[in-house]
């Protein structure tokens, strides 16, 4: 495993992070424990979860939420690996039926953090992330709440997720005026097939020294050999429909992967991790074997010719303002 600084911070995170959205939901507790054991054994030190993970996510539902954190908490107590991982969780989504059981008010952040600490059975969260922007709450209120959590030792670093570039800029400006570190990272959807963040968000993060944590690096399996799976009759009807809409690109992509003698998932991860500003990519795993199969993306080195071919197959939008102006 290799490691990179999370943005401008001194914190080192593994280039592959373990995603735990399905722990206690699609993965039973025993399998979840096995995957976490294997992750630590492989050198993965960044575990990502959220208070809302562990059940079907919907705005009007609060049942099953917190299950992923609870599974991780029981594993931490059993394994003794708390000091070996960078534990990241999130707050924003509904965690109850009350009007203040959601979003980023100081009221909710304090309660949400304490609830996550109880479920995770730990006294601190290494990276506390805002799961979505809350434009109805002023940054002065949000940063005051976060500063208190840091001062009390409950949180070490603060991150964002699903923010627009201008949200990041406003947040960081407000933090700077308070002489607070502010955002250490932004977690966003980013992969070869989904590159919209390159227009404004990626340049903003790079300029501000905020680390990019990429989620869905394999585009929900589309970049992991989906065309081959469809051809072999191993794909779901949903995946068959997704492949049909991008058949030509996938055919060229998987053909290039064969030329490189590399698994498609590893090629997609290697491209992403080679992108300036990307600190780590979150990989979910339904089994130990699936987790280990993706580790090759860390060591795979793509030459300039291979990168250019990938750019030709999956062209990016370019950076603003040149992407849409002279």
Image (cartoon, grey):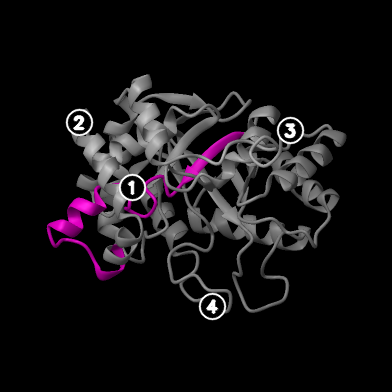
Q: Kindly identify which residue carries mark 4.
A: 61
Q: Is residue 159 left or right of residue 32?
A: right
Does residue 156 appear in this view?
Answer: no
The magenta-colored residue range is 211-239
Query: How far from the left and from the top, in percent, is residue 43?
Result: 34, 31
Q: Earlier in the sequence, mark 4 or mark 3?
A: 4
* 1 in relation to 62, above or below: above
Q: Kindly identify which residue carries mark 3.
A: 181
Q: Earlier in the sequence, mark 4 or mark 2?
A: 4
Q: Earlier in the sequence, mark 4 or mark 1?
A: 4
Q: Kindly identify which residue carries mark 2.
A: 259
- Cβ atoms at labels 4 and 3 below 8 Å apart: no
Marking on residue 249: 1
Q: Is residue 288 left or right of residue 73?
A: left
Query: How far from the left and from the top, in percent, is residue 238?
Result: 31, 68
> Closer to the camera: disc 4 or disc 2?
2
Query: How far from the left and from the top, in percent, is residue 98?
Result: 68, 77
> Closer to the camera: disc 1 or disc 3?
1
Q: Residue at x 49, y 64 (%)?
A: 66
Q: Earlier in the sequence, mark 2 or mark 1?
A: 1
For the residues labelled 4 and 2, the Cα–Cα distance comes to 47 Å
Does residue 154 appear in this view?
Answer: yes
Residue 220 magenta-highlighted? yes
Q: Could you classify mark 2 by the number of other residues whose Cα lies within 10 Å: few (under 14), some (14-19), or many (20 or more)?
A: few
């Amino acid at each position: 495993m290799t490691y990179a600084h999370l943005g401008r911070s001194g914190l080192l995170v593994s280039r592959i992070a373990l995603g735990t959205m399905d722990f206690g939901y699609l993965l039973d507790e025993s399998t979840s424990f096995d995957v976490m054991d294997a992750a630590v054994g492989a050198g993965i030190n960044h575990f990502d979860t959220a208070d809302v993970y562990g059940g079907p996510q919907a705005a009007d539902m609060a049942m099953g939420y917190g299950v992923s954190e609870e599974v991780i908490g029981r594993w931490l107590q059993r394994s003794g690996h708390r000091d070996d991982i960078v534990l990241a969780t999130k707050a924003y989504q509904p965690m109850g039926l009350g009007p203040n059981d959601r979003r980023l008010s100081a009221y909710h952040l304090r309660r949400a953090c304490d609830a996550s600490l109880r479920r995770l059975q730990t006294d601190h969260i290494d990276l506390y992330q805002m799961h979505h922007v809350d434009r109805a709450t002023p940054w002065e209120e949000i940063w005051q709440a976060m500063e208190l959590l840091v001062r009390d030792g409950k949180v070490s670093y603060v991150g964002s997720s699903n923010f627009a570039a201008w949200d990041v800029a406003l947040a960081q400006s407000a933090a700077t005026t308070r002489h607070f570190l502010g955002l250490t990272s932004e977690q966003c959807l980013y992969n070869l097939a989904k590159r919209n963040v390159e227009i404004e968000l990626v340049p903003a993060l790079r300029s501000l020294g905020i680390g990019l944590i990429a989620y869905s690096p394999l585009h929900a399996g589309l970049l992991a050999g989906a065309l081959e799976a469809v051809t072999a009759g191993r794909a779901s009807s949903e995946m068959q429909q997704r492949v049909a809409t991008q058949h030509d690109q996938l055919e060229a992509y998987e053909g290039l992967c064969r030329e490189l003698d590399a698994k498609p998932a590893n090629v997609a991860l290697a491209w992403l991790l080679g992108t300036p500003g990307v600190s780590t990519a979150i990989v979910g795993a339904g089994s130990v074997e699936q987790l280990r199969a993706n580790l090759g993306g860390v060591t795979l080195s793509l030459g300039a010719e291979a990168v250019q071919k990938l750019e030709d197959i999956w062209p990016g939008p370019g950076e603003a303002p040149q992407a849409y102006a002279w």
